[in-house]
Image: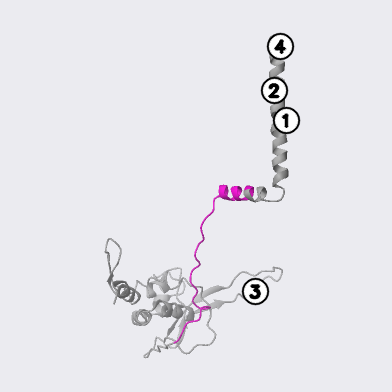
Amino acid sequence: MWKSKVAKVLRNSGKAYQSLSKLKIRMPERKVGPPCGEKCRLKCKEKIDEISRQHIFDAVWGLSNLDRQREFVVRHSQKIKPKYRYSSTQDFRALNTAFYFDVNGSKIRPSTSSDSFPSILLNTQPLMSSNPQQPTTHDAMIDTGDTLVDPQEVFSPEVVRPLPKAGPRKSIANRKRRKTAILTDTPEKENLRKEQDIAKNKKTKGVNKKAKVNKKVEQ
């Protein structure tokens, strides 16, 4: 197996691995982050104990696959519908997304502002980079109870979307140059050239007349 493949599997599993960069940095193993403080509004520390936190952490990183980890995040998210919206507006703002965990058969919503949700999953930047959307028809996913359901299913592109690639940047000078080229390549090219020649001739005639007048004055 290639070194890059081994490093990828270890990285997606949350285990220690050695990077393939020139520095060959040794990346440490991932661990569950600290819980929320006493000032947490949702009281995550009281609702989700250390055992449940560790169980969720092991379930996510035990998948060893980035796409399936993203699927876990998507499945444990839901849209928040506001109680009231102004009917005068044409385009409503997109609904906010709330994340939750299944703990002892009940949905517990952790705090994302105080890093409770990221601290349990840890390194959620690659996991949560895709736009969370509710899946339509899927079997049971991962449960935080005594058993774990591990379905072998193919992910649809609607659920996990790759990040779009940025195109090359074009300077303003190139745009102006292109615009001038387009104008000069049109059927009006000859007319534009004639107008420019006439303007040059007028300018040279005026200069010559001034030179003759200055000579006469000097004489």
Q: The disc labelled 4 sits on which kind of residue?
A: Val
Q: Which percent across, then down, holds residue 49?
A: 36, 80
Report which residue position mark 2 lands on: 208
- Say if 145 sits above or below 1 in the image: below
Report which residue position mark 3 lands on: 84
Query: Label 1 neighbourhood size at 10 Å, few (<14), some (14-19), many (20+)?
Result: few
Q: Where the C terminus falls, by quadrant?
A: top right
- Check contact, mark 2 vs mark 3: CB within 8 A: no
Query: Label 2 neighbourhood size at 10 Å, few (<14), some (14-19), many (20+)?
Result: few
Gap between marks 2 and 1, in whole Å?
10 Å
| Mark whose residue sits in front, 4 or 3 | 4
Q: Which badge, 2 or 4, comes first in the chain's sequence?
A: 2
Q: Which badge, 1 or 4, comes first in the chain's sequence?
A: 1
Q: Which badge, 2 or 3, comes first in the chain's sequence?
A: 3
Front residue of this view, candidates 73 and 159: 159
Front residue of this view, candidates 33 and 50: 33
* Helix, strand or loop status at disc 4: helix
The residue that appears at 69% across and 24% down in the rendered structure is 207
Gap between marks 4 and 3, in whole Å?
88 Å
Q: Which percent across, then down, holds residue 156?
A: 50, 81
Q: Which mark is residue 217?
A: 4
Question: Which residues make up the magenta segment?
Answer: 153-180
* Helix, strand or loop status at disc 1: helix
**Residue 91 as seen in the image, left or right of residue 11:** right
Q: The disc labelled 2 sits on which kind of residue?
A: Asn
Q: Which badge, 1 or 3, comes first in the chain's sequence?
A: 3
Q: Which percent across, then down, holds residue 66?
A: 40, 76
Report which residue position mark 1 lands on: 202
Q: The disc labelled 1 sits on which kind of residue?
A: Lys
Gap between marks 2 and 4, in whole Å?
14 Å
